[in-house]
Image (cartoon, rainbow, N blue to C red):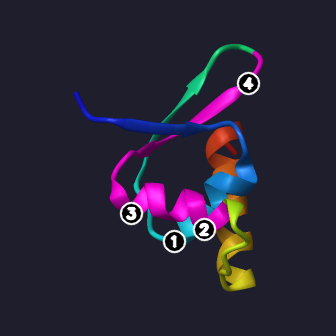
Amino acid sequence: MENIYDTQSLYEGAFLLSKGCSLTGKKNDGEKVTLLFKDDPKTKNEVLNFYNNGTIEAKKLFDCYRTLKDFVFKR
């Protein structure tokens, strides 16, 4: 079975998506949605970058944030 990294933070998810990490799906427990990413060395590195104030182009980050919101809320 493939390893999965999960997060409930849209901000973290948008950062990972904008850095090219592979979104594999989402889980919905009725109250919260969890974003699922492929857990590989790239994802692990970008998670650390996110929490260590890594940089990303603003437009790319906001585009990915909107994409994830649409994905979570099925717009």
Q: Give the magenta part as a residue range.
A: 31-50
Residue contact at pointers 4 and 1, CB within 8 angstroms: no
Within 10 angstroms of label 4, few (less than 14), some, or many (20 or more) residues? few
Q: Amino acid at mark 2?
A: Asn
- Circle nearer the N terminus (1, 2): 1
The residue located at (32%, 35%) in the rendering is 3
**C-alpha span from label 4 to label 1:** 24 Å
Residue contact at pointers 1 and 2, CB within 8 angstroms: yes
Residue contact at pointers 1 and 3, CB within 8 angstroms: yes
Mark 1 vs mark 3, foreground winner is: 3
The residue located at (45%, 69%) in the rendering is 20
Say which residue label 2 marks: 49
The picture places residue 51, in percent across and down from the top left corner, at 69, 60
Horizontal relation, residue 22 to residue 71: left or right: left
The picture places residue 45, in percent across and down from the top left corner, at 47, 63
- In reply to whether residue 65 is colored magenta, the answer given is no
Say which residue label 3 marks: 42
The residue located at (69%, 73%) in the rendering is 61
Residue furthest top as drawn: 30
Within 10 angstroms of label 1, few (less than 14), some, or many (20 or more) residues? some
Say if 62 sits above or below 41 in the image. Answer: below
The residue located at (71%, 14%) in the rendering is 30
Say which residue label 4 marks: 32
- In reply to whether residue 39 is colored magenta, the answer given is yes
Q: Secondary structure at mark 1?
A: loop
Say which residue label 1 marks: 19
Mark 4 vs mark 1, foreground winner is: 1
